[in-house]
Image: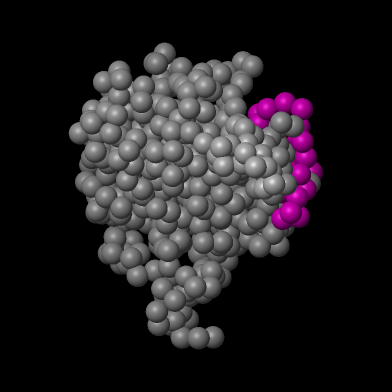
Amino acid sequence: MCPFLDIRALSLYIEFTIPQENPLKSYLSHLECTNCRQTYSAEEIHTTCPACGKVLYARYDLAAARKRFTRDDARTRPGNMWRWFEVMPVRDAANVVTLGEGYTPLLAAHNLGREFGAGKVFIKEEGLNPTGSFKARGLSAAVSKAKELGVKAIGMPSAGNAGAALAAYGARAGIDAYIFVPEDTPEMMKKEGLVYGAHVYLVKGLINDAGKIVRDNASARNWFDVSTLKEPYRAEGKKTMGYELAEHFNWELPDAILYPTGGGTGIVGMWKAFEEMEQLGWIGAKRPKMISVQAEGCAPIVKAFHDGARHADLWPNARTLAPGIRVPVAIADYLMLDAMRASGGTGVMVSDQEIVEAMYAMARLEGVFAAPEGAATYAGYKKLMVEGFLKPAETVVLFNTGSGLKTPELVTGEYPVLDPRDPELASKIL
Ligand SMILES: Cc1ncc(COP(=O)(O)O)c(C=O)c1O
Ligand SMILES: [Zn+2]
């Protein structure tokens, strides 16, 4: 094996080989329930808390990590999310299943801010991830840990993008992927599952109906059920968005983050990252206002926030053209709502029409073809600027969580057809 002298060179061939003489060390210590605080071994497979059924988090010995892992260490490592290895849940780097996810650009969006005289609006461009969405982060982490724990098959309900990501990482890891998506999931996301060789099933219903199929069949089929926040590791991948933001802003977090919310891994993952970084001594106590953006046709978290509730009711007849946020019920509702409240954040609903308008605006003003979910954050931003909740001087990050290339049906228009032999051709080019 080649000596591991310059880790940056590894970014040329995407694999996470580690030097024999100086292996990276994960400070993963145990799993902890976010509700009843019961602790569990991280060396065995767990999904939700066996005692109370709520969300388990991976925990690290941050006091020990603090002595060995500095915020500058990651700078010299390859440009993917595994550069935070010490606070990632995989023990042996040989088990990392990576396609180069993470380390996405933070784009200044001056043209979007101009309308409001706001100079510090940014887009975190997650559409550039492998498989075209931020789901790559979560599934890289979950599949890597599954590989380490000896899992042979994974089952998962998905709105589409997570399924595509599981299919890709499962293929790379040699783990069978069983993916259950709503029947009307965008074509491209279903096809991604097929091309990667996953078992893709269309479900007559929504993601929660698909989730029930996975739940009911997981133990008989020996699937590791990686439903959103029903296992501890997808959130560990998503939390790296929080680490990256801190690094982008030179270890001073922005004033507000707008996140298109389905199951909520991004909000809770980033919130967890901020807490970890404070314990590592990398950032101070300042937190961004965590703002959940949902669609008018499916806004359980936003409603619960404004109702002052700690849990969200199931949203009946969930409907929106943004599939990733058509999630009527989320196990991590309390974690999202806690983060939104503790940070002085809020929740905002946007209509499908506003989402489509925002998609065009982001494309035409910034050159970013956003997924409808990502476009929802700009629609939400505009509302909160008009309301005065957000101020022009604030540093605001909009999460474009996926690529618009996956949902071309949302773009409509006419193309004039030209006949090269037409003598009137020149007059037809406007
Ligand atoms: C593009 C996109 N954005 C946002 C979401 C919502 O993510 P989460 O379930 O982590 O809240 C999804 C989920 O499928 C998605 O595909
Ligand atoms: Zn518990």
Residue under the point 50% across and 42% down: 369
Residue lying at the far front in this picture: please name it.
423
The image shows residue 98 at horizontal and vertical percentages of 55, 62
Residue under the point 29% across and 29% down: 115
Residue 212, magenta (yes or no)? yes
* Relative horizontal placement of residue 312, taking residue 396 as reference (left or right): right
Q: Quadrant of residue 388?
A: top left
Residue under the point 77% across and 48% down: 199
Residue under the point 53% across and 69% down: 14
Please say whether residue 93 is visible from this viewpoint: yes
Q: Quadrant of the N terminus?
A: bottom right
Against 234, is 22 above or below? Answer: below
* Relative horizontal placement of residue 410, taking residue 286 as reference (left or right): right
- Between 268 and 192, which is closer to the camera in this rendering? 192
Q: Main secondary structure of the magenta part?
A: helix
The segment highlighted magenta reads 193-220
Total numbered labels: 0
The image shows residue 208 at horizontal and vertical percentages of 66, 29
